[in-house]
Amino acid sequence: MSRPLDVIIIGSGTAGLTALREVRKRSERFVIVNDGPYGTTCARNGCMPSKVLIEAANAFHRRLVFEEFGIRGGAALTADIPAVLRRVRALRDSFVGYTLQTTEELRERSIAGRARLLGPNRIEVDGRELSADRIIIATGSRPIVPKPWLAFGDRLLTTDTLFEQADLGRRIAVVGMGAIGIEMAQALSRLGIEVTGFDSGHRLAGLTDESVNATLDALLRREFAIHYGSAAELFEAPDGIGIRNDETRIVVDQVIAAIGRRPNIDGLGLESLGVALDAHGMPPVDPHTMQIADLPVFLAGDANGQLPLLHETADEGYIAGVNAFATQPVGFARRTPLAIVFADPNVAVVGKRLSELDSAETVNGAVDFDNQGRARTAQRNHGRICVYADHRSGRLLGAEMCAPAGEHMAHLLALAIGRALTVNDLLRMPFYHPVLEEGLRGALRELAAQLPTAGTSELGTCGAISPPADPRAG
Ligand SMILES: Cc1cc2nc3c(=O)[nH]c(=O)nc-3n(C[C@H](O)[C@H](O)[C@H](O)COP(=O)(O)OP(=O)(O)OC[C@H]3O[C@@H](n4cnc5c(N)ncnc54)[C@H](O)[C@@H]3O)c2cc1C
């Protein structure tokens, strides 16, 4: 039998390719195996095409405020959905193209096929057995579709198929109001499609702060209907797909299933590793080393179900790639939690969610954007930011928001939380005028007023001029 390889990587998505980069720095004795289309979920049917669609939708949506700006003729604009989708695919192809180069140049070290584990050092791909000192599993995830829904054929969409459509129906139901559901529902509604959202719970986009959730709910409901609180059921109707829950019953042309994603670990042979699997078939994975138990096997990216976000997936591929060559796997400190939903206004959760904090130890500050000066100039004055800090030290702990430019403010807060900054540290930074961050400052000031340091004199404690009439207020 030939000498084992140093590393086998299973899956050439973002996690697999990031692992590959680290592996290639250390060895030439590796293979990467991938099943299905190459090009990564992010570029092919995830982050990137969804954002292309959202950008088109938001651009078209702006016409609704043109009259108020004094710009006439907006009502005559139309959205050409097939053209919008063509642009999504054109840009998608270009993003995919970049990722393909990496595996194409590997030649025989890149194997197309479905891998199955035969043990901690062995896999099988299409009848061929390969062995390696280390195995990195990075098989990603796929949309969850309840089995009975498959009966609706190509009228039942997921983000795997949505961007492939040449055109879309006039009426679409989106089931699941998590990150992906909200992004797609709002985008399609903004493009003129009659969208109806369904969710069995009441929380949107992973928010746990009821006040931010209520703000987002009210804003989204201005654009499309959402029916909460009970599971949606599909049925065949004479003129389309019927969909009902306890609140409503409607007929649509297409349904988008956005009820979550399942790690691609079934049928992978994880039972051959000899470690206990949980009820979902998941082995124990250390989130700091990506190692499965004490085996020479690492599980990174969406496949481990821990942090299914692009930047975390890339980190995990990196960690697995480095640790595949370490005598003792290194425990990496993970980044400050940051999750963004590209709705308008942007939804973001940074650091700890409200639900993770002890209310007796935490103070909360909030700001609404209705009267925020800069937001009003752009007619983007909707949203809310809630920030949370430790009630003694004033250290910033987390934030939940749906706010204009929330994606940027969330990054600022992530930096502050990661650096263990206090509310007063943040208030000492310059806030240029007029910017949306002045809104965030309003929430921070509300926090500062509740801290033991309130009343001390320094520039950080300088208050607003005359809120809320002053445009710099908030
Ligand atoms: C619509 C959508 C929008 C998103 N938007 C964002 C966003 O805005 N920001 C963000 O941070 N994240 C976003 N995400 C999440 C992000 O795209 C994923 O976290 C990330 O792409 C996962 O990468 P991965 O490497 O784990 O998996 P993938 O990129 O899916 O790669 C896994 C690969 O493994 C292959 N494979 C599976 N089983 C086997 C097997 N047995 N043998 C061989 N190969 C196998 C798969 O076919 C695939 O090619 C979005 C996801 C979706 C679906």
Image: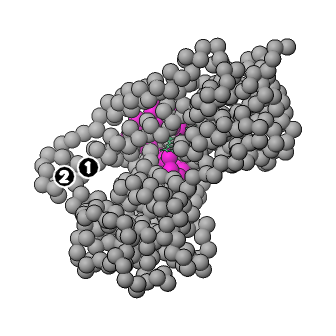
What is the span of residues highlighted in magenta in the rendered image? 157-182
Amino acid type at image mark 1:
Arg
Q: Residue at x 43, y 35 (%)?
A: 49
For ligand 1, the image quadrant comes to top right
User: Would you say the residues marked 2 and 1 are in contact, meaning their CB atoms lie under 8 Å apart?
Assistant: yes
Residue 140 placement (x, y as % from top left): 63, 36
Depicted 15 relative to depicted 363: above or below: above
Which of 257 and 330 lies nearest the eye of the viewer?
A: 330
Q: Quadrant of residue 127?
A: top right
Instruction: List the residue tagged with mark 2.
Output: 66
Residue 402 placement (x, y as % from top left): 42, 60
Residue 117 placement (x, y as % from top left): 78, 29
Which of 449 and 376 lies nearest the eye of the viewer?
A: 449
Q: Residue at x 49, y 66 (%)?
A: 421
Q: Residue at x 59, y 78 (%)?
A: 361
SS for dot 1: helix
Depicted 123 relative to depicted 156: above or below: above
Horizontal relation, residue 338 to residue 129: left or right: left
Residue 137 placement (x, y as % from top left): 70, 34
249 within the magenta span? no
Q: Quadrant of residue 208?
A: bottom right
Instruction: List the residue tagged with mark 1.
Output: 62
Which quadrant, please, contains the C terminus? bottom left
